[in-house]
Amino acid sequence: MTDTSEGNSPDGASPDELLRLAKEYFRKVDAGDPSLLDLFTEDARAYYPQFGTTHGKEELVRLVQALTTAVSRFNHDERSMVVTQSGNRVVVEGVETGTLSDGTPFPGESRSGGRMCNVFEFRGTLISRLHIYADPDLAGRHSDMFPLAGSS
């Protein structure tokens, strides 16, 4: 994991602590750990393509349920992660792989190659905002939507 850090967060959490919390988030996602929600503030906001933006833990639960209905297993490769930090924000770029609920592995033939980027904002040691940028067509089943796109 590559790390570029800059300063403490306004809430006093150190860059190392915020990085540890971001890594913990990925470990909990990959393990399907229900305590994942404990990492978030009660009023947390989250965004995921094709789902939209959530406000608060109750809506966040619906996002998690939607993802776990579609995906039976995630794996985020820490070795591929590039981290940029500034204040209370941690940005993680990397690669995710996994298995859809129907058994299809991803990214498969997806043009995205499983690339993802998560932007975390923390309030103290809890996630107050998380925007997830990833190809929602995890297994590359809908490449016909962009027929002129190259395969890279």
Image (cartoon, rainbow, N blue to C red):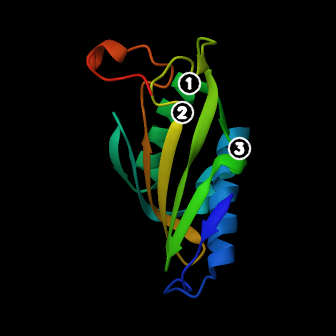
Residue contact at pointers 1 and 3, CB within 8 angstroms: no
Please, what secondary structure does the residue beneath circle 1 have? loop
Total count of labels: 3
Please, what secondary structure does the residue beneath circle 3 have? loop
Residue contact at pointers 1 and 2, CB within 8 angstroms: yes
How far apart are labels 1 and 3 at the CA level? 22 Å
Mark 1 is on which residue type?
A: Pro
- At x 48% / y 49%, what residue is drawn? 117
How far apart are labels 1 and 2 at the CA level? 5 Å
- At x 62% / y 52%, what residue is drawn? 81
Please indicate whether residue 142 sits to the left or right of residue 124 in the image.
left
Choose mark 1 or mark 3, whichever is in front.
1
Determine if residue 72 is in view. yes
Choose mark 3 or mark 2, whichever is in front.
2
Residue holding disc 2: 114
- At x 37% / y 15%, what residue is drawn? 142
Residue holding disc 1: 107
Q: Is residue 121 above or below residue 69?
A: below
Please report whichever mark, 3 or 2, sits nearer to the chain's N-terminal start. Answer: 3
Residue holding disc 3: 33
Please report whichever mark, 1 or 3, sits nearer to the chain's N-terminal start. Answer: 3
Q: Position of residue 55 (x, y in %)?
A: 36, 55
Q: Quadrant of the C terminus?
A: top left
Mark 2 is on which residue type?
A: Gly
Mark 3 is on which residue type?
A: Asp
Q: Position of residue 11 (x, y in %)?
A: 52, 85
Please, what secondary structure does the residue beneath circle 2 have? loop
Quick one: 73 or 149, which is closer to the camera? 149
Determine the image quadrant of residue 146. Answer: top left
